[in-house]
Image: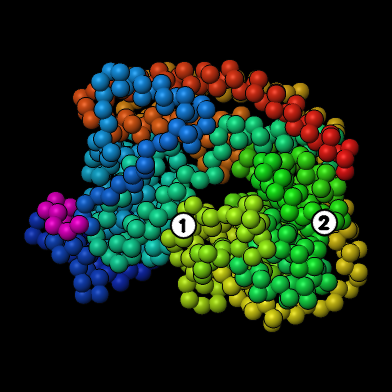
Amino acid sequence: MADMSLFERNLALLQSTQPNVGRLLSGYVPQSQLVYDEDGEPDVEFRGMRLYGMGAEKYVRRPKTEPWQYPHRFTLGPPQVERLDPQTGDFMKRYLRRAVDAGMTFKTLQTTQTAYHLVVLGIGLGAHINGLIDLHQSRHVALVEPNVEFLYQSLFVFDWTALAERCAAEGRAFNIVVSDSPDEISLIVRTMIKNANAASVDGTVVQVHYPSPTLLATGPELDKQIGLMLSGFGFMEDEFHMISNTYANLEDGTARVLKWRRDEAYPLPVLVVGSGGSFDESVEDIRRLSDRALVVSCGTALRPMLMAGIKPDVHIELERDDVRYDILSELIQGFDVRDIWLVGSSTVWPEFRRMFPKRLYYFRPALSAFPLFGLGPDSGLHQASPTVTNAALCFAQAIGARQIYFFGVDMSTRDPNRHHSRNSWQYTQAHEYVYRGGWDLELPGNFGGTVLTNDVLLWAHDELEMAIRAVPGGRKYFNCSDGARIAGALPKLPKSVQLPEPGRPKKQLVEQLMTSFPLYAADVFQERWRDGALYRDLEEAAVELIDVIERHRDHLLDLSYLVELMADYSVVTRQLPVEKLVLRGTVLMILMCGEYFLSRLEQIGRREELARIMGEEFIRSFEEMGAQACDDLRAMIEERVTLSRRAAEDA
């Protein structure tokens, strides 16, 4: 019989620990009912059909006769030393040399059932959950259920409170996802995994509980997005570049910095112009509308716009390396861009000031430069990566634009041989560019049909949609690009766009906006820099890493050390301290490489021996990181400041 006291305890638990799920179940009126077999085992009868056709425990114990019943594992390729940063490469060479010298060998696939992440596709009545955790010793469990009926009925027969108590006692965590959309499930689960512990994506177990179309379609979707679970983590050296460039861009007190205009509506509509293939078909309409809107060029769109006689009001840049500066300075020769405002990440190459005397910087909250130099949440652009188009949308939102139009923002292609405007740098003879990742993913087209995309552009596309959802507030978004459909942006043919004459001269409106943002004063800079306190913080963070490994070195196989480290280094909603943002990418990659080979050791009986070697090499790597970090960062800052000051003299 149904246990009402168990139901009430379970519901109270989910209301407090998983509030979205708790709200969904509170007051829910089921259309199904629990039924029991001769042994008292439950099943669910829903619309004349039974979920299991037998007792729940019997269903879990039944023989495996179908392919979907077997677990699927995420399996990454072996790490390539040449693609790693120096710290991770040195770790891996030492680690593997010691293992091979000790006579150890490795398989292509995992040789252990252990998996930090467990994705259970189907909760049903929950009888299988504890057994799967036991089998895989998982630390993070994502429980997915497309049918609210089954989850609701589980509250009567499965002890969710006991599961929560077990997880708390053993250093585990679980999250429940309720959705009947494979795309939505994949997005949520990939984010959960990335947030919980990106270092342990390899080996993740995906187990289907019952064969619904939604659940069977979700597994392959998750497989396609493994790369996105690993994206966005810069190595330690990358963060040094971010900090050094920001230091050089802001230290002299002449640059302006963004501040969100949350309560002000900007009078001009904004055209966000990308360099997708459909730019060429819409260029005449962009020109027609350019006197009636604030026009924003996104990275590589600047060249085709200038060649078409369209000068943007604002140019967006995102990346931190000198390659973008070198390419752009070469390709815009013959064009005067000095009256265009550069809106760049604080981390862009310092010599951009030579090209663009008028500069406004924004901070990227995911980078170490934000907590170090940022002026609070309103100085940052969330969802401003991975592409300049993402940053351009966020800029338009930040200035209070109420109408935002996308042109050439394809995020995809219909023809893999034509992924950008024909006048973009990707098709110049010196820089002809081919997407290495291919075009193996599909999205619905903005004007019908399907379009081809890849993992980076899919990531960018998803971030655009999240940014639109995050900032509705009376704004209207229009997608005039012949590329991927963008949820929240109304498809609109370029020729159908009509804009009114601005009430005041456009140039005046643009300059008034851009000069309203505050200068980043020299005294503010010194206050944020704290006389180089970051150097001491980096050394202390390295010591903390070593302490964690020392505490767990005799039981690294149970993954508890990863739980403790991820409390400080995972991607979560709270802002990580600067020093941990600096170290995070390299730390995660070192951990990933260590666990990758430990999970593939052919001599299973020697896993403790290899774990001991791994722990010793972790400690050595973290010691070296602490010793090298400060000298390397000091030298890089000095170099970038010199470049910036020379560029200022030339401007």
What segment carries the magenta color? Answer: 59-67
- CA neighbours of label 2 inside 10 A, class few (<14), some (14 to 19), many (20+): few
Report the Cα–Cα distance between label 1 and label 2: 34 Å
Q: Is there any visible trace of residue 572 in the rendered image?
A: no
| Residue placed furthest toward the left | 38
Quarter of the image where one finds residue 446: bottom right
Task: Reply above or below: 108 against 609.
Answer: below
Question: What residue does disc 2 label?
Answer: 334
Residue drawn at x 87%, y 67% is 506
The disc label shown at residue 438, or none: 1
| Residue placed furthest toward the bottom | 496
- Which amino acid, by three-letter code, is at mark 2? Gly
Name the quarter where the C terminus is drawn.
top right
Name the quarter where the N terminus is drawn.
bottom left
Q: Is there any visible trace of residue 215 in the rendered image?
A: yes
**Is residue 62 on the magenta stretch?**
yes
| Residue 549 x, y percent position in the rendering | 43, 21
Q: For mark 1, give the secondary structure.
A: loop
**Is residue 596 on the magenta stretch?**
no
